[in-house]
Amino acid sequence: MAKVLYQNIKRNEKTDLGGRRQRSQKRRNRIIGIAALALLLAACGAPSERAEEMQSAETKEEPKEWPKEHDSCEVQELGGYLYDHTSVSVSPYASAEITIKDYEGEQLETDWDEPSAFQFAGEADVTWRFYNSLAEMEAALNEAARQEMDVDSIHFLYYTFPMTENDHALDLYYILKRRFDSEEHPLIACSTDKGKLFYYIQETLKEEDGYEFGYLQSRSSRVNLYVKDRTAYGLTLMSTSPEDDEALEYVFEDVFQHYGTLWYGSGLSEENLYWIDHDERLTELENPKRSFLEVRGIDENREDAGDEGIMRYFGLLVEADYELPLTEDGKMLSLHFSLAEEESVELRYYLLNGFCMDEPYDMTVTDMETGEVLQEHRVSLSIELPDTITYPDLNGDGYADMRVGAPAHINGAKAEEEGYTSPTYLLWDSQTQQFVRKTEKEVENSRQAVANGLTEEEQKDKTKRERRDSFAPVQDLPEWAEAEDYIKLMSDMIPEYEVQEGDSLWRISQRFYGTGYKWPAIVRSEDAPKDPNCLLVGETVFIPKIFYIRKDPYSRGGLSSEGSFQIEQPDGFAYYFLDGDVTYASWREENQIHNLPVTNSVGENPFHEPEDWEAFQAEAIRCSEELCPGRVSNLTFEKSHMEDGCDLYGYYFEYDTGEEILEYVDFFKFGKANMAEVIGVREQEPNTVLVNTVRYMAASFTDYGGKPGMGWGDDTAPNVGADKWKYPYLHNLFEAAREQFGTEN
């Protein structure tokens, strides 16, 4: 019917324009405005002529003929007058033609939390008309649009009609949007008065001083329709003079503020509009065949609006059904999900804080051929509908698996998966004939197991054996390697050798290093001849053990001159910045590497002398025995010399928590005023040495010219376990392990 109405109006326009070419542009605008009303009426269920005839035949009642009512009021009283008259109208279908003469008006200043106020001058003549149906009202309004208007006056058309049970807010929005939405005048839907009133209106976008502003009332806006308590109220400007451009805005706000609080509201999405007048929604999709049942829920976080506040409504998924082929030509499964009812939470209420996420659903898996229930399980789903669950073959074994997304759904918005909880995976186990929950790492292990023809346990062991430590030190550089791409370290233990008759640096290098090319690494005393070919019998030379660690071009850090340093971890390792009172969280990551630049309060290298380093080792052994009796094993200390003349110190050990073995390692490097401490913790793994990774990180320092002053402030907490030994500027990993895993806690 909307199409027929629109075509009739367009024919009227063509006839009118053909007969009167000189008619003003204002008249054309007025007719377009009434065309908008025709579409509004059609969208809201205006019955066909045949339907009206049937209705008359059934009721056998003659349509009433309503006399026109003429009235007038001061413009200042117009809003209240229309509101009062409509509320006691003799018919729910009514319109008022309003003519304002000698208009003067302005908007008064009010506080932000008060309704708008206006000062008007002039008189409004009002002609009321009443109708038996929407169709009758629409015909009369189109006839009124053809009448000549006094250009010296302002003319409005006010109308009201009820929305029937079958009239839906979202359907009306779609019709209006298709007809009237444009880039300059976008159609919007808004809620106000705590959700008790909603309206459709065209914005008018204007650019002023390089900024874009939106105006809700304008002569160019063809849609101005308000709905409250299932009754629609509209106001259309029929004619005005250019100098009265603000008239529409003032009159609109004055008229409609009587129906609710218009100065505070929220935009409505299509989801909001749907749940205004629907109690449930059934969605059916294919590939795979699936259906979803939602009911209208109520967000208890918006309880101030009461149960009638439309911004409280949202779609709550209560049931979902899937028909799934387990294999391409195998058995068919039926999966049914039903929202698990919690005794403490009513079904209709939204989750707290305005988010819906990971609601509990009871899953039932049934063999569709035999009717046998294969599995009953509880799983978490988002409120989002179509693709929360997908059924790819995750591990390549030919069976469909299950990927359960976990997006968060905010009231009035679509769910988004990115940035929230990771998805859940359920893999089909052909042995147990059930879906089994798996982590992402376990899914990858299963995929590799299928590809290699192994069990998942066999693949897990194989992966551990093949894993390589990419940061492990090497004694020889690859032939293609550039020296600047590697960090050179030298062992603290340097063997001595007394030169024999016939020796040369080349032959000594062959004897100790296996190749003569390493002869430059041999260290001679300061008083030895500078000529490398002049080697004295009886001379003592030193044979350092040299190894190299590959630099990572994407992970550089450094201790710059006397003030600043920066440390970054290699790719693939979790990063935590230790502040004062640290406790180690549960082991969610494969490795935990902690990088900590600290002010060196001693002002120098405290372990420079051999006896100081030995004293530290003794203190560490004492702490391991007193703080962690029977739990620490393989406690090892390591010291290396670096090319830049600094020394690198560290210790590492294994700690028995009672349930698993954890590897701890701690390395530090000292500057004159600052030091850097690098801590690594992880579950014990074979064939991979955590100390290599941590040592690499500590050894990768390069000056970068950072800002001075990094370190501990006076108001920060001390390092963990600072009071348990003589080195408060270092973390005591024995105390840290005891705090988290000791028998005391």
Image (tube, rainbow, N blue to C red):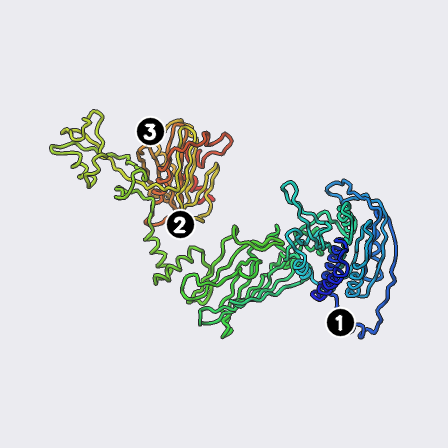
Pick the front one: 178 or 144: 144
The quadrant of the image that shows the N terminus is: bottom right
Mark 1 surroundings: few (<14), some (14-19) or many (≥20) residues within 10 A: few
- Alpha carbon distance from label 2 to label 1: 79 Å
Residue type at tag 2: Glu
Pick the front one: 108 or 384: 108
Residue type at tag 3: His
Q: Which label's residue is closer to the chain start, 1 or 3?
A: 1
Percent x, y of residue 220: 71, 51
Pick the front one: 3 or 625: 3
For this view, does 318 lie left or right of residue 555?
A: right
Percent x, y of residue 370: 49, 75
The quadrant where residue 519 appears: top left
Query: Circle 2 sits on which residue?
Result: 660
For this view, does 634 lie left or right of residue 48?
A: left
Q: Secondary structure at mark 2?
A: loop
Q: Relative to residue 371, is residue 266 depicted above or below?
A: above
Q: What residue is rendered at 25% in x and 43% in y? A: 479
Q: Which label's residue is closer to the chain start, 3 or 2?
A: 3
| Label of residue 51 in the image | 1
Q: Secondary structure at mark 1?
A: helix
- Alpha carbon distance from label 1 to label 3: 102 Å
Would residue 305 be visible to someone looking at this image? no
Residue positioned most to the left:
501
Residue type at tag 1: Ala
Query: Circle 3 sits on which residue?
Result: 608
